[in-house]
Image: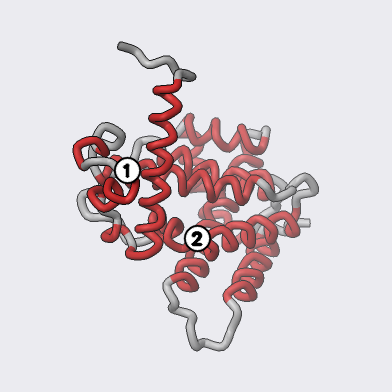
Amino acid sequence: MTVRANSPRARYREQTRSEIKDVAVRQLAAGGIEGVALLRIAKEIGLSGPALYRYFASRDDLLAELVLDAYEGAAAAVHAVDTEDGGRAALHALTHAYREWAVAQPHLYLLIQGTPVAGFTAPTDTVLKARSVLGPFLSVFAQGRPLVRVDPLVAQLRTWLREEPEVAAWVEQWTGQTGTVADVALTGAVMTWPQMHGTVSLEITGQFDGMGHDPATMLDIQTAILADTFQLP
C-alpha cells in the first residue's frame, strides 16, 4: 500500500529518520565515522535493530544521507552571503563563510572532505551538491580579468566546458554567461577550491597548532592573492 506524503504515517517516518540522523551526527562528532553504529542509534531512540533497518538499509545508506546533508549545510552557509556587489569583498565573505561553517562543525566537514571511508560509495547526487557550494564563487569570478600566467589553466578548463554540457549549464546558471566569461569564472572557482580547503583542512585537523598564526588571517591573504590574480574590483 502506498503511503500518502502528508499522512500521519509518512510524517512519523520522516520524524524517525530525522531522529536517527541527529543521533548519528552526535556519534560522528564524538567518535568520527567509526563511531557511527546503527545498533547504538536504535537503542538510544527506542527502536529494535531490525526496526531501524526499515529506515536505513545499512550504515552506508545512513552515511550517504549525512554526506548530502553536510553539503547542503555548506551550501546554505555560502548562499547566505550577499554577493550582489561582487568583487573581492564578496570573495572574502564567501571563503570566510565556508570556513566558519567548517570550524563550527568539523565532524561534518571531515565527513565530506576528510579521508574517504573504505568501501563507501558516495551518493550519485554528491557532485551536484558540491557544485552548489561552489556556485556563488562562479558569479564572483565572472567579473574577473585573469593575469596572463593563468592562461594555461583557463585553456584547459575551456576545453572541459566545451566537452561537458552539464558543467557548462552549471556555470551558465550561476553567471548567466557562456564563452570567455564562463571560462574565467570556472577557472577562478576551481583555483579557490584547493586554496580554501587546504587552509581549512589543516586548521581543522590541528596542523596549524603552535605555529603562531591565525588560520583566518592566512585564508584572508590567500583570498586576496586570488582576487589580485583575477583583478577583481
Q: Residue at x 36, y 51 (%)?
A: 24
The correct choice, above or below, for 130 with respect to 57 in the image is: below
| Amino acid type, callout 2 | Gln
Judge by depth and name the residue closer to the eye, 13 or 36.
13
Q: Quadrant of the C terminus?
A: bottom right
The single residue placed furthest to the top in the displayed view is 1
Between the residue at mark 2 and the residue at mark 1, the CA separation in whole angstroms equals 18 Å
Q: Residue 178 in the image: x percent, y percent?
A: 63, 33
| Location of mark 1 (residue) | 62
Q: Quadrant of the N terminus?
A: top left
Q: Residue at x 30, y 34 (%)?
A: 55
Q: Residue 221 in the image: x percent, y percent?
A: 65, 72
Corner quadrant of residue 31: bottom left
| Amino acid type, callout 1 | Leu
How are the colours assigned in the image?
secondary structure
Residue 50: tell me if it is visible.
yes
| Location of mark 2 (residue) | 105
Does dot 2 land on a helix, a strand or a loop? loop
